[in-house]
Image (cartoon, grey):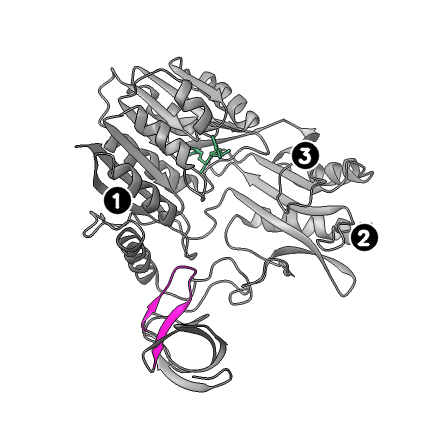
Amino acid sequence: MKKGQVFQARIEDLVYGGKGMARKDGEVVFLRGGLPGDLVEAQITKLKSGWSEAKIIKLLQPSPQRIRPACSHFGGCGGCKLQDLAYEAQLRFKARQVRDIFQRIGGFSNPPIKEIIRAEKRFFYRNKMEFTFSTFAGEPILGLHRAGSFSQVFDLKRCLLQSELSNEILAQVREFVRRRKLSVYDLRGHKGLLRFLTIREGKLTGEVMVSLVTADEKFLEMSELAQILADKFPQITSIFQIINPRKASIAQGEPKLSWGEPSITERIAEFSFSISPNSFFQTNPYQAAKLYGLVKGLSRLKGSETVIDLYSGTGSIGIYLARSARRVIGIESQEEAVIDARRNAELNGIGNCQFIQGEVREILPQLGKKPDLVVLDPPRAGMHPKAIDALLELHPPRIIYISCNPATQARDLTKICADGYGLKGVYPLDMFPHTYHIESVALVEKV
Ligand SMILES: C[S@@+](CC[C@H](N)C(=O)[O-])C[C@H]1O[C@@H](n2cnc3c(N)ncnc32)[C@H](O)[C@@H]1O
C-alpha cells in the first residue's frame, strides 16, 4: 500500500479510541468515523509498519448499526464519538474491549467478564463540564476540543451532555468575554487571561458551581461577571475564579471564591456529598449509584470488617460502605478532597471513617492496619508499582479495583494475581454513553 492510495473496504470492528478497523491486503487500516459493517471508499493518509490510517472519502454502504446522531456538533467534536452507533452496539463494543484488554494486556486467557451495566440516561448525564477558551479570526471562542486535536477548539453552541442551563451559562460567559474584549490564554505564547470555564451541577440537588480558570489573579471584571451570572441564573450557588499560571493545560489551580457558597452538594443514592472546585467527583451520578451499589454487593461486608478505600477522593465510596463495616480508612493525595471527605462523613452522620492525606505508595506502608477489604479507584494511569507492592504487603483477602482505564487496570491486576490472587469477576459499566470510555470493576480474592 502507498500513501494516497484509494481503496474499498468493509469495516470489521471498532478499536479503543473509537476508530473503525478494516483490513486491506491483510494489513490493518484504522479509519476515523468508520463503524463495523460500513463499506467505504478510503484513502491512505499514514503508513506505519504493520498498520496504516486512512480517511473515508465515501460511505458506499452504511452499517445497519448506524443511527442519526442527535448533536449538531457530531463529527467535528472530540466528545461523543460513538453517537452515530446504536446504543446496543456501543455496549457490545465496550464489553468486547474489556475482554480483549484483559486477554491482551493482562494475559488472562479466559477472563470472567460479566454483562455490561447499561445506562438508562444517555444524554444530559454529566454533572461537570470543562469548556476551553480559544480564539478564532481574532474573536474569543469558548467550547470543546476538535476531534483528533489537543489544541484546536470550536465554538460550542449546544452540548447534549450536561444540561440546557449549562449551555445558557456558557453562552452568557462568551457574550460577556466578547463584549468586554477580554484576552484569551494562548497555549503557545503563554500569554493572555482566560483558560477554562468549568460548570459543575448537582444533578440531584440542582445546585450549580461556575468556575473561571484564569492564568493570572488579576481579573478586574470577575466580580461584574459573577454578579451578571448570579442575577440571571438563580440556580447558581457558587462562583469561583481559579488561578492557574502554570503551563500545564488543566482546569485546576488556586481557588478564589467570587460569589456564593464555597462548595456544592451532589447526591448518590441516599448520601449527600459536598464538593469543592478542585476535588474529583464521579461525573455521572446516575451510573455512579449503580457502580457503588455493585461495589457494595461484591464487598459482602457483614459489619465487623476494616475497609481501606485507596484514592478516596471526596470519600464517596468509603462513606457508601461505612454502615456495613466496622471502620473505613481512606487515602487521598489532594488536600481539598480530603477536607471534603471529612465534611462528607459528618454530613451523612458517619462516625467510623477516617481520611488520610498523602500518596498511596507512601501512606500505605505506614498504616499498620490489616484490612479485610481494599477498594481502590486510581486515576487513568493506574497504580504506582510501589503502591501495588505496599498493597500486597497487607495481604487483604479481597480487593475491588475500580477503573476508568481497563488497560492499566488489567496491567496492575496481572501483578496482583501473580502474588496469589484469583480474578473472580470483571464488571464493565457504561459510565460515559456515546464515548469510547469504559468503566470497569474487578474483584480479586486471595487463593
Ligand atoms: C478516579 S478518582 C476516585 C475518587 C473516588 N474514589 C470516587 O469514587 O469519587 C482518583 C482519586 O485519586 C486521587 N489520587 C491521584 N493520585 C493519587 C496518589 N498517588 N495517592 C493518593 N491519591 C491519589 C485523585 O486526587 C482522585 O481524587
Residue linked to disc 3: 240
Q: Earlier in the sequence, mark 2 or mark 1?
A: 2
Residue sitting at 64 percent across and 45 percent down?
248
| Nearer the camera: disc 1 or disc 3 | 1
Q: CA distance from mark 1 to mark 3?
A: 39 Å
Q: Visible in this render: residue 120? A: no
Residue under label 1: 426
Drawn side of residue 354 relative to residue 139, left or right: left
Q: Nearer the viewer, residue 329 or 370?
A: 370
* Callout 3: SS: strand
- The residues tagged by marks 3 and 2 sit, at their Cα atoms, a distance apart of 21 Å
Between disc 3 and disc 2, whose residue precedes? 2
Amino acid, disc 2: Arg
Q: Nearer the viewer, mark 3 or mark 2?
A: 3
Q: Mark 2, mark 1: which one is toward the viewer?
A: 1
Q: Is residue 77 left or right of residue 59?
A: right
In the image shown, does 202 or 409 lie closer to the viewer? Answer: 409
Q: Quadrant of residue 247?
A: top right
- Marks 1/3 in contact by CB < 8 Å: the verdict is no
Q: Position of residue 70 (x, y in %)?
A: 47, 63
Q: Is residue 12 visible?
A: yes
Whether ligand 1 has any atom under 8 Å from the Cβ at mark 1 is answered as no
Residue 159 found in image quarter: bottom right
Q: Amino acid at mark 3?
A: Phe
Q: The magenta stretch spans which residues?
A: 12-24
Q: Which residue is mark 2?
A: 179
